[in-house]
Amino acid sequence: MSVISDAPAVAAAQPSAFAQRLYRAIWRWHFFAGLLAVPFMISLAVTGGLYLFNDEIDASLFRYRNYVTVGGTELASSAIAQKAVAAVPGSTLSSYRTPAGPDRSARVTVSTEAGNVLVFVDPHDGAVLDTVAAKEEFNQVVEDLHSLDYFGASWERIIEVVAGFAIVLVLTGVYLWWPRSQTGGVLTVRGTPARRVFWRDLHAVTGIFASVVILFLAFSGLLWSGFWGAKFNAALTANGMGYPVQLWDSVPHSMLITTDVVAKPSWLMENAPVPQSTRPADGQAALPPIGLDNAVTIAAAAGMLPGYEVAPPADETGVYTASIFPADLEYERTIHIDQYSGERLVDIAYGDYPVTGKAIEWSVNLHKGQQWGLFNQLLMLSTCLVVIAMSVSGVVMWWKRRPGGRIGVPPAPRETRLYLGLWGIAVVFGVLFPLTGLTILAMIVLDQCVIRTVPPLRRFFS
């Protein structure tokens, strides 16, 4: 459900002694999961809510660099790229994003020793509108804070654990909320903010209404995780349910994958191989590279939506890679172009994905608020606000309930079969979500072997 929970109202009909002990055991683990997850859940909700509106933020706060005055003809792509490279001394071209419309700027990514830099250029007169380090671009910072990549790649594992705990919180929260003959606090909030019952009901009622969406966000969010998501992606591809590998059968592969040449590919295409350009054989006349302008023209002629990005070849066997991943999945596309012949070696669109691949890309789009326009954004934003409300209400009701000087953890069950059940749940989570499962196992060991056996700790956590 959400975070640190208090027990719901006592049922009208007294449950059995075992049912009461089971209830308290689940309540205890709901409490522990919330205790660990609450700060990260709030962070995910705040940054996720912001990122839902990244296009609107670009169109308002950063309009000065994303929009231009319409007028005259556009400069050649290569000329725009040269302006960008000249604006950042010592840089080299990394990728070129075409203007998404006649009133939009071109965005050029250049590489430096310190990292990539984004250069925004007016395509009509070549004026450089702004430069910003790629890692410091506002929406990128929000995204990196959301995943904790901002603090280093290893921190991303924490979010993977939290996503697993979000699933635990929802499942245990639904169990704790289940009516059991009572009517108050099921679908309505009782009392006033001065009373603990108000915060308990607010926590439960908001949580039950948002539980399905929170589960969806947790599962779909795991797709980006460095461990579970990467393993799941590889498993889909190995079983013919990921990107269509047959499209690469007749082309030579390089050692690169799509993430090496495209900054933000679709989830399904992240590990797809990048083909190689065919160099002229010995004795044949060498063909000159087609150049950026021709690569952009080839991509446009193939029907790619304006706003696509073109990455140049890294070496003499590399390819031009044109890609676009818009809100409308039907226009999602990646094209690899031979740098000598201009041949489209691999051309893959959303329609080429298998059913499972389409379903996953659809879920990713929904997670990011891009599938149903404003409705999707507002649905996800309201869920983010609910997560914050549940987190705050969970903390408030815990604070009102806790004994002085102690944490106030719900009492541990003494029945062996209850603990065997908890171990069984940990094993299941260990199989489905290894990092979360390992964390649950560590919590059980800490609870049983440390907290319960060290008197000061037992009192503090009681």
Image (cartoon, grey):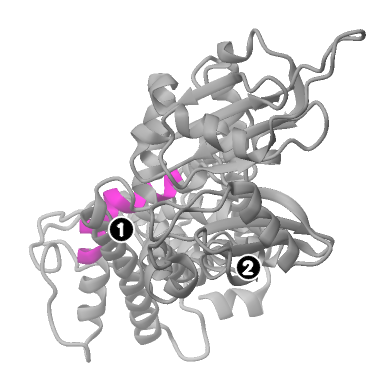
Q: What stretch is highlighted in magenta?
A: 205-220
- When asked about the image quadrant of residue 270, the answer is top right
Residue identified by numbered label 2: 451
Q: Inspect the image, locate mark 1, and give the three-letter code of the amino acid beneath it.
A: Met
Q: Which amino acid does label 2 sit on?
A: Ile
Could you classify mark 2 by the number of other residues whose Cα lies within 10 Å: few (under 14), some (14-19), or many (20 or more)?
some
Residue 295 point in image, percent of width and height: 60, 33
> Does 281 sit left or right of 227 as displayed?
right
Q: Which residue is drawn at 58% across and 45% down?
A: 437
Foreground pick, 263 / 427: 263
Let me know if residue 55 appears in the view. Answer: yes
Front position in the image: 61 or 217: 61
Quadrant showing the N terminus = bottom left
* Residue 291 within the magenta-colored segment of the rendering: no
Query: 178 above or below 363?
Result: below
Using the rendered view, name the quadrant where residue 337 is placed. top right
Image point (47%, 69%), residue name? 38
Question: Quick check: 69 left or right of 339?
Answer: left
- Percent coordinates x, y for residue 318 in the rendering: 76, 29
Is residue 212 within the magenta segment? yes
Residue 30 on image: x %, y %? 42, 60
| Residue 445 visible from this viewpoint | no
Between discs 1 and 2, the one toward the N terminus: 1
Query: 104 above or below 394?
Result: above
> Badge 1 is on which residue?
380
Element type at marker 1? helix
Question: How many marks on residues?
Answer: 2
**Magenta span main SS:** helix
Q: Distance between the residues labelled 1 and 2?
A: 39 Å
Left or right for 240, reference 151: left
